[in-house]
Amino acid sequence: MKTNLSLLVIASVFFSLLPLQSSVAAQDLVATNDIAGGSSVFVFRGSRKAPQARAGGGKASLGEGGGRVGGGSKAAGGQIAAAAKKRRADAIAARKKAAIAAANKKIASSNMLTAKAETAFDNDQTDLAITNYRAALVQNPKNTRASEGLSNALTAKGIDVAGDTNSGAAIALFEEAVKYDKQNDVAYAKAGAIYDANGKNDKAALNYEKALAINPAYTMLYPPLGVAYLDNGEIAKAETTLQKANAAGIDTVETRYLNGVILFKQNKNTEALAAFDRTLELDASFASAQYYRGQTFDRMERPDDAIAAYKKTLEIDPANSAASFDMGVAYYNKGDYPNAAAAYQQNLKYDPNNAQAHANLASTYRQQERYSEANAQYKAAADKGIKSADMECEWGYSLGKTAEWDAAVARLESARQMSPGAVDNNNVGWAYYNAGYTQKAAKNDAAATENYEKGKVALKEALVQEPQFDAAYVNLGATHNELGEHQEAVEALKTADRLHPNWDVALSQLGRAFRGLKDFVNAIANFKRVVDLDSNSVAGLFNLGEAYNASGNKKRPKECTTGSRILIRQWQRLENAFNGKIDAAKQKLEQKYQNCRDFLDRSQNRGYSKVRFEWTALFLYNREFRTSR
């Protein structure tokens, strides 16, 4: 009996310092078992596999994907260029009339400078023209010929600065141009294109509207204007604009795409899909159309087709962050966590400040039991501005799985502050219980007791909020056990057993409570129930055998004898793992076993026997090696 009690102490100390094995009792419950009985239950808010949300449609802007530059098609650019040429011709005719209007020396000087500016402008010396137009307006601010000329010259300069990429540096030139001539439709149209390319949809729409009001011939501005309306959420205006484009006989890749996006926004999924397919008939490299196909398939609950469309989007435009994000969501919701992680990693490569992608990647790592990596991603999401009770809950759980209990308590306390419900109080109690268990193993009894007492308060509050909360009863019973309050533990755990019959974690704690009361008949009965549920349960066999010994019954019961044979076979397989006789995939566990050896070798130097090492290594095998097969 003395030997087995010593074994109980060493197993409790060592394994409470390691992350505990998970066995999910229900979709949102995660129970942990320790060989010596340190059992508790974590409850996810909602569901631990709650589906992630897509990006929500993204932007419709033509500049989003496929290397397209916002501001409309080449046809629109051609109309702008033709209009600019016409304005220059009109200016030549106007200056001939203005030449006879000089009435005095200042007007004459102004006119002379205007003529020099016009000559320079005709020779494509735009900067010199601007200088002379400005000087002319100093001499005569009412020189309409100079102000219109300066507006044209500034517009020409702006077009050069904008270049093929629609550089935002040209905006100041167009804004100044319309100050000198409020009817400069070219300046408005080009400014709209630049705002469009840079994602400033409201300003793009405003400038397109002004250009069309001055010059209705800008029919090719209808498609980009319609897209700008869509991105502003003005679906009715977008539809009206598309109708105008159709009335003008415009059938381009942009109008087909615009039609598809409008149908998508109206939840007409089948028609939208057909429109995007028609768009791709004209331009198979139109990344935004492929992306919206993926969004449409997602809505139609066709995840495989959605993923295929997102993949095609990324083949065309690897930097399309909306596609990589939504592909991650689609994979995650299918339960394909390796591919979900890869998609989120690609998203963060091009959009490293995407806080939600960090949070989703953290959840993905958590599902893969890559808890250290999950914790790093939760921190990144928090640093970039996400703070929600759900994320704090998940993060607290992952920190617990890496035995960072103080940090886990902090995160779960934060979740409780944001949403003080029964689930949050239970999880705070769970974290305090495990923090206390760790402190007790380190022989910090005062700190352990403080944690247990804090956990007890939270768990009792959870049961006030939800009197039928089975997990909270288990955690409360476990906490009472650690505080030596075994009768209170029995009462809580009997309630848990009634609410959730044959739950091994509750039965193990109930057995411990009866053992603490020295009621070995009921202790044995409950541990036997655990073994009956799972004849290979190392924790159940261990506790059953220990309870028999503690009761004074030295005759090994059949269950323990059978269990010993099972454990011996497992020990032999564990030895094979140490000797390199199994495949490489399982060799990654060797370091954990070696840590066990090192710890127990040091323990043997202090007088512990080899049997303790064997029992501990057997449990480690059962927890890590057997469950990883």
Image: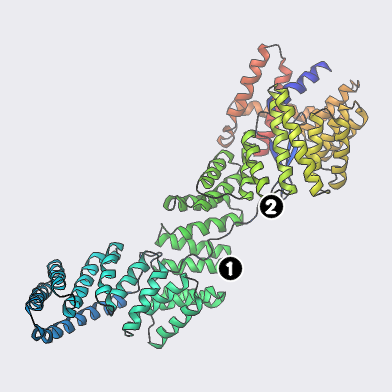
Q: Is residue 427 above or below residue 2?
A: below
Location of residue 274 in the rendering, given as x and y in whole percent from the top left corner: 50, 77
Q: Pointer 2: residues within 10 angstroms few (<14), some, or many (20+)?
A: few
Nearest the eye: 114 or 276: 114
Location of residue 151 in the rendering, given as x and y in whole percent from the top left corner: 22, 74
Location of residue 112 in the rendering, given as x and y in whole percent from the top left corner: 7, 76
Location of residue 300 in the rendering, given as x and y in whole percent from the top left corner: 59, 69
Label drawn at residue 299: 1
- Quadrant of the rendering where the N terminus is positioned: top right
> Measuring 42% from the left and 72% from the top, which residue is drawn there?
228
Q: Is residue 307 above or below residue 394?
A: below
Can the viewer see residue 464?
A: yes
Q: Is residue 493 above or below residue 88?
A: above
> Measuring 43% from the left and 81% from the top, which residue is drawn there?
241
Quadrant of residue 98 in the image? bottom left
Say whether residue 82 is left or right of residue 26: left
- Quadrant of the rendering where the C terminus is positioned: top right
Label drawn at residue 47: 2
Tally of marks: 2
Q: Residue furthest front?
A: 104
Identified by mark 2, the residue type is Ser
Say whether residue 27 is left or right of residue 540: left
Quadrant of residue 71 in the image? bottom left
Nearest the eye: 526 or 165: 165
Q: Give the SS element for disc 1.
A: helix
Which mark sits nearer the N-terminus, 1 or 2? 2
Identified by mark 1, the residue type is Arg
Q: Pointer 1: residues within 10 angstroms few (<14), some, or many (20+)?
A: some
Say whether residue 286 is left or right of residue 536: left
Can the viewer see residue 534?
A: no
> Measuring 52% from the left and 77% from the top, which residue is drawn there?
263
In contact (CB < 8 Å): disc 1 and disc 2: no
